[in-house]
Amino acid sequence: MSEATPNPWRRRALLGLPLLAAGGAGLGFWAMLRGLGTGSYDPHGVPSALLGKAPPDFTLPPLAGSDLPTLAAADLRGALARPVLVNFFASWCVPCVIEHPQLMALKRQGVPVFGIAYKDKAADALGFLARRGNPYTRLAADEPGRVAIDWGVYGVPESYLIDRQGIIRWRWAGPITEDTVAADLGPLLRRYSA
């Protein structure tokens, strides 16, 4: 039996594939760094199919033990008195602790913040709010996380700004910070309050 001689072009192509993949990855990384430098790339700016649309249909139970009203899609549609912020949070979420002072500041400024406890036990969520303060005017429980899936939530915290007509205008994946309020949320609140 004679051995077949390997095709030299095939061998070169196989050797070139890892180099081609590494070059593509390097080009992508360079583009990301350049975008960070120019401000055109935002690592928190996760795209959402819901922007410019009404929130998906949902009805959530109240957070057990809370005396606040619950939340449903009907509460976010139609003529709202002012824009509202819908915030998915959890007691076990470390970034939610970082974000919490900003939610309290928004409440003091009169911004309605509607909370959805995501995959959290009621007692734990209520304990979290008892220790840190309650920024929410409505509070619901999404313990199985099904409503969060419909909203496209990647993780908590995640927030959505709903304008007075009930349209989602902004989404923020991650904790809202002072910088986020100054650069993004504050101008949008002023714009959609008129």
Image: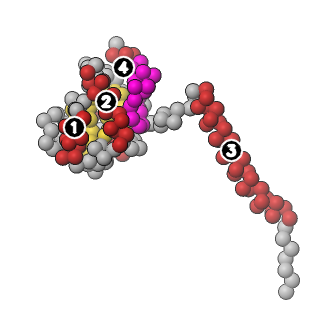
The CA distance from mark 3 to mark 4 is 39 Å
Residue type, mark 1 in image: Arg
Q: Answer whether labels 1 and 2 touch (C-beta < 8 Å).
A: no
Name the residue: 31% across, 40% down: 89
Q: Nearer the viewer, residue 150 or 46?
A: 46
Q: Which residue is mark 4?
A: 189
Q: Earlier in the sequence, mark 3 or mark 4?
A: 3
With 105 as the anchor, is 43 left or right in this view?
Answer: right
Which stretch appears magenta?
Answer: 170-188
Name the residue: 61% across, 36% down: 32
The CA distance from mark 1 to mark 4 is 28 Å
Discs 3/1, front? 1
With 111 as the anchor, is 7 left or right in this view?
Answer: right
x then y, percent, for residue 1: 85, 86
Q: Within 10 Å of the Cα at label 1, are there few (<14), some (14-19), or many (20+) other Cα atoms? A: few
Q: Answer whether labels 2 and 4 touch (C-beta < 8 Å).
A: no
Q: Nearer the viewer, residue 7 or 135?
A: 135
Q: Does the rendering let one see residue 22?
A: yes
Q: Secondary structure at mark 4?
A: helix
Q: Which residue is mark 1?
A: 131
- Quarter of image, res 57: top left
Discs 3/4, front? 3
Name the residue: 61% across, 26% down: 38
Discs 1/4, front? 1
Discs 3/2, front? 2
Q: Secondary structure at mark 1?
A: helix
The CA distance from mark 2 to mark 4 is 18 Å
Q: Earlier in the sequence, mark 2 or mark 4?
A: 2
